[in-house]
Image (cartoon, helix red, strand yellow):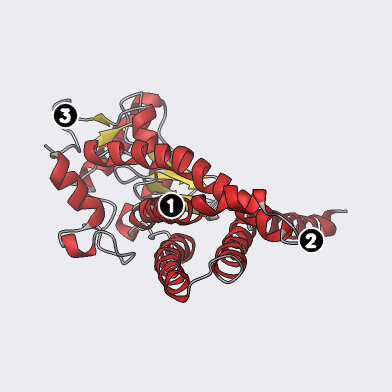
């Protein structure tokens, strides 16, 4: 039985990894269906004039391209590796395990944290430490059980991307939400006038009518829900908070410190100093995800 355990563990891990990709595959399928519904069923199935058809198709392709670009970037961008100097060497790890009690443990972690410039502390006042990764956690870093690693400036783990929304992916995540809303508004704005007409004149075009109706319904629902989610995250950006920090604020060694350095500077920290690139899904975030300016 013992020799089977590693094999069973590998099989379980493989099945878990496959399951984790199912939401992403569903998202890809929805993008593919929306392309068919709008371009094939609507533009080439209902729109009568060539000029209108071209304008609608070009506009949709532009919106969808930007949305897919941001979406793919959120999925494929790797989580930054926590720099090695936050990891404990064998001597430090042995000394930490040999501490006699909580106060000694806390005191030794304090020394390790000061040597690494850590500004925040855990709820019990000690420097935050991850036993699984054997490292002193950088500020705003958290261990993700899904990714099985410590993630710099972790916001949350999102199953729709099978990736952590964190320092390296947060801008792409925001832009995915933004372009989803933009694409949905564009779709509703260009198709709403055809909905009533198609239902009054269904005839042999029921399939087209069905696709168009579902497209409009989603085009209304997405801006409401995704738009609200985007607004929530924009408020977090303006305050320089992550979702986790919004639930429980960071505890600083010096109580007067804060990561909130002003709304504009907070936005620049996420989207970058070049405003022309704010809406472009390329990496422009400031810093390395382990050290942040404070007020």
Residue 251: x %, y % from top left = 27, 28
Pointer 1 with pointer 2, Cβ within 8 A: no
Nearest-to-viewer mark from 1 and 3 = 1
Contact between marks 3 and 2 (CB within 8 A): the answer is: no
Q: Nearer the viewer, residue 178 or 271?
A: 178
Measure the alpha-carbon separation of dots 1 and 3: 52 Å
Q: Earlier in the sequence, mark 1 or mark 2?
A: 2
Q: Position of residue 247 (x, y in %)?
A: 39, 28
| Place of residue 264 in the rendered image (x, y in percent of width and height, measured from the top left) | 14, 45
How many numbered marks are there? Answer: 3
Q: Which residue carries the number 1 mark?
A: 189
Residue beneath the point at 31% across and 35% down: 127
SS class, disc 2 = helix
Give the CA distance from mark 3 to mark 2. Answer: 49 Å
- From what the image shows, is residue 190 above or below residue 242? below
Q: Is residue 248 left or right of residue 146?
A: left
Image position of 213 with respect to 279: above or below: above
Question: Residue at image x 14%, y 47%?
Answer: 265
**Image mark for residue 254:** 3
- 265 vs 150, nearest the viewer: 265
- Quadrant assignment for the C terminus: top left
Per the rendering, the mark at residue 7 is: 2
Asked whether residue 14 is in view, the answer is no
Q: Earlier in the sequence, mark 3 or mark 2?
A: 2
Q: Residue at x 41, y 63 (%)?
A: 63
Label 1 with label 3: CB-CB less than 8 Å? no
152 or 282: nearer the viewer: 282
Q: CA distance from mark 1 to mark 2?
A: 54 Å
10 Å crowding of disc 3: few (<14), some (14-19), many (20+):
few
In depth, the one of 225 and 77 nearer the eye is 225
Mark 1 or mark 3: name the one nearer the start of the chain: 1
């Amino acid at each position: 039985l013992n020799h089977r355990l590693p094999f069973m563990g590998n099989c379980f891990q493989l099945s878990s990894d496959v399951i984790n990709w199912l939401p992403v595959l569903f998202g890809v399928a929805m993008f593919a269906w929306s392309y068919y519904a709008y371009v094939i069923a609507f533009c080439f199935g209902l729109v009568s004039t060539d000029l209108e058809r071209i304008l609608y198709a070009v506009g949709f392709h532009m919106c969808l391209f930007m949305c897919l670009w941001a979406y793919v970037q959120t999925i494929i961008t790797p989580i930054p590796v926590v720099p090695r100097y936050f990891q404990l060497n064998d001597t430090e790890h042995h000394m930490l395990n040999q501490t006699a009690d909580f106060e000694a443990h806390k005191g030794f972690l304090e020394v390790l944290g000061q040597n690494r410039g850590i500004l925040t502390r855990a709820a019990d006042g000690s420097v935050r430490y991850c036993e699984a990764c054997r490292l002193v956690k950088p500020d705003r870093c958290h261990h993700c059980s899904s990714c099985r690693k410590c993630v710099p400036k972790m916001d949350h783990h999102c199953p729709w991307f099978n990736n952590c929304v964190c320092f390296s992916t947060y801008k792409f995540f925001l832009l995915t939400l933004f372009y989803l809303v933009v694409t949905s508004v564009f779709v509703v704005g260009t198709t709403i006038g055809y909905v009533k007409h198609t239902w009054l004149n269904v005839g042999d075009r029921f399939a087209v009518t069905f696709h168009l109706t579902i497209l409009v319904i989603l085009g209304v629902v997405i801006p409401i829900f995704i738009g609200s989610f985007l607004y929530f995250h924009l408020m977090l950006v303006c305050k320089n908070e992550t979702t986790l920090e919004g639930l429980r604020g960071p505890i600083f060694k010096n109580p007067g410190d804060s990561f909130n350095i002003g709304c504009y500077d907070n936005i620049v920290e996420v989207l970058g100093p070049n405003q022309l690139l704010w809406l472009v899904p390329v990496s422009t975030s400031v810093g390395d995800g382990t050290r942040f300016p404070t007020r």
